[in-house]
Image (tube, rainbow, N blue to C red):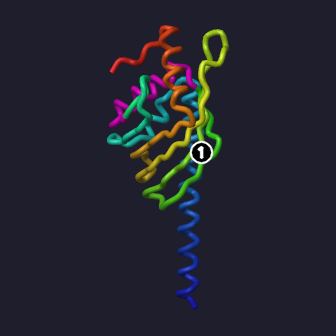
Amino acid sequence: MIEKRSLMLGAGAAVACRAAVARTILVKLRRDVRRLNEGDYRPLLSSYAEDAVLRFNEGRHRWSGEHRGKPAIERFLRNFVGARLKGELRAVWIGGPPWALTLAARFDDRATGPGGEQLYANRVMMMVRTRWGRIIEHEDFYFDTGRIDAFEEKLRTLGLEPVAG
């Protein structure tokens, strides 16, 4: 009887620990997106491992391709902020053990021009893999990738060039 009770207590503690880790990551992610929207990408960047990879759809835009390592991801995020993009987490799903969580998130992003006109809006599904709370792999899947290329053209017309590599 004692073994069964110990097993049940251990299982309960493991489930509670996983839920606490997932909740902590979700709170940090929401806070980091809020800061990103305010123009500060550094809190979000701190979530990435040094050797993390961020994959973005190919195209004729500043975010295109694979961004490997923190310096490349920082350039990606600087371009996000520089383009006046804002995002909103619509839903987040988290699965896996605390040392290897996978997150799937619905993220809507948009940008407005100097006169307040909407330059861009899109929907994104993000897949994020973590190792002990650090992002090791991040991939974005866009509803309409053509909108990103059109947005790039608008940015260049406004004189907003990509961040130098």
The structure residue drawn at horizontal position 36% and vertical position 35%, both measured from the top left corner, is 66
Q: Which residue appears farthest toward the right when viewing the image?
A: 116
| Residue located at (61% from left, 10% from top) | 114
Residue 89 pos. (x, y %)? 62, 39
Q: Is residue 113 above or below residue 66?
A: above
Quadrant containing the N terminus is: bottom right
User: What secondary structure characterizes most of the magenta part?
Assistant: helix
The structure residue drawn at horizontal position 43% and vertical position 45%, both measured from the top left corner, is 135
Quarter holding the C terminus?
Answer: top left
Determine whether 100 is above or below 4 in the image: above
User: Magenta stretch containing residue 70, yes or no?
Assistant: yes
Left or right of 165 in this view: 139: right
Say how many tags the image has: 1
**Which residue is depicted at the point 44% across and 50% down?**
130
Whether residue 107 appears in magenta in the rendering, the answer is: no
Residue closer to the observer: 105 or 2: 105
Direction from residue 51 to residue 61 in the image, left or right: right
Q: Amino acid at mark 1?
A: Val
Q: Position of residue 150 (x, y in %)?
A: 52, 20
Q: Which residues are magenta?
A: 66-85
| Residue 11 in the image, given as x and y percentages of width and height | 55, 74
Q: Nearer the viewer, residue 9 or 135?
A: 135
Up-down relation of residue 127 to residue 120 (above or below): below
Q: Mark 1: give few (<14), some (14-19) or many (20+) Cα within 10 Å.
A: few
Q: Quadrant of residue 139?
A: top left
Instruction: Kindly identify which residue carries mark 1.
Output: 27
Q: Position of residue 108 (x, y in %)?
A: 61, 34
